Image (cartoon, grey):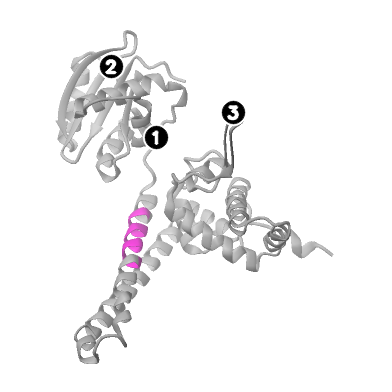
Amino acid sequence: MKNYLFHVGIDISKLKLDVVLVDRTTNTLEVHFVVPNNTKGLKRMLSVLKQRKVDLQRTLYCFENTGVYTFPLSCFCFENGFDYWIVPAVEIKRSKGITRGKSDKSEAKDIAYYSIRNIDKLQLSSVPEQSVQQLKLLFAEREKIKKSLLLFGSTKENSGYVPLDVYRTVEAQNKKTIKFLKASLAVIDAKMRELVKRQPKLKRQFELIKSIKGVGDNTAIYFIIATKGFEVFASARKLACYAGVAPFEYSSGSSIRGGTKVNHMADKTMKSLLQMCALSAVRHDAQLKAYYLRKQGEGKNKMLVLNNVRCKIIGRIFAVINRDSPFVDTCKFVA
């Protein structure tokens, strides 16, 4: 691990960046300044750091993940070869302990000191490939359209309950809107498949994931998006934690003996997709079907067994990616 001389904490908002520089040798705040959250502001930040005689190659930049507002700073650090660390906001918040009051300057300072105290947890971030970024935006649009289809589809519930003349005032327009949304959904699906086909690496990963029974096109694409092309999760267990399907023990002393259960903090989209995969797998995959029926016969809760199947699917996905070969159904070789 690199021995950093300076730590820069950056609080990101839509229009500005609050920057705090901390000298690692003395753990003292050197300077605080504010720059616009754009290319001009990022260049000014670099200029200020140079004026302070900061060794840019021995500086760690740390900031929260604030979605799209984080992207310009991430790209700037990546293009200049700077070490940067994007940390979930909830992790920094919980690390601060009891606090009173809040300001952008104090947030930036807390982020800088977080990077010093938790340097043993450091996982340098990187910008995903352009194709993965495009897939991410397309998938987000797809989710919006699916929600819209559900909303506009609920208009049919009026049929048979309100007078026909009243319902007809919206029926035709509602059908047109739903038809347009379905057409848009088909276009987005086609664009995502085309993007995957154009990139040999993503195409190979897509084919490997699809070789697992129960996993469909959209699930395979979302796994590529969430893992940034399988670059950010070191093991299946870590991805299972992220997806919210990894079980954890809940106990304390002799009085609290809770059963193992999953945590509510999760990628809900991935968790939902894995649930559909598990339901499909226990119907069409002989091995998982036998496992599911055996565990149910032992009296295990249905949802617990399905969660185990979700974990097994994640394990299979990591296995095919790591060995770079399709999934092999061993059941068909059994005499």
Q: Nearer the viewer, residue 261 or 292?
A: 261
The magenta span reads 136-146
Q: In the figure, residue 33 lies in which quadrant? A: top left
Judge the density around disc 3: few (<14), some (14-19), many (≥20) Cα neighbours within 10 Å.
few
Q: Which mark is residue 125?
A: 1
Q: Residue at x 44, y 30 (%)?
A: 123
Helix, strand, or loop for circle 1? loop
Viewer-proximal residue among 8 and 81: 8
Separation of disc 1 and disc 2 at Cα?
20 Å
Q: CA distance from mark 3 to mark 2?
A: 41 Å
Q: Identify the mark nearer the N-term, 3 or 2.
A: 2
Q: Main secondary structure of the magenta part?
A: helix
Q: Is residue 195 visible in the rendered structure shown here?
A: yes
Three-letter amino acid code at disc 3?
Answer: Gly
How many neighbours does mark 1 have within 10 angstroms: few (below 14), some (14-19), or many (20 or more)? some
Labels 3, 2: front one = 3
32 relative to 324 in the view: left or right: left
Q: Residue at x 23, y 22 (%)?
A: 20
First in sequence: mark 3 or mark 1?
1
Horizontal side of residue 264 vs 297, given as left or right: left
Judging from the image, what secondary structure is the residue with disc 2 in?
strand
Residue placed furthest toward the right: 335
Q: Which mark is residue 22?
A: 2
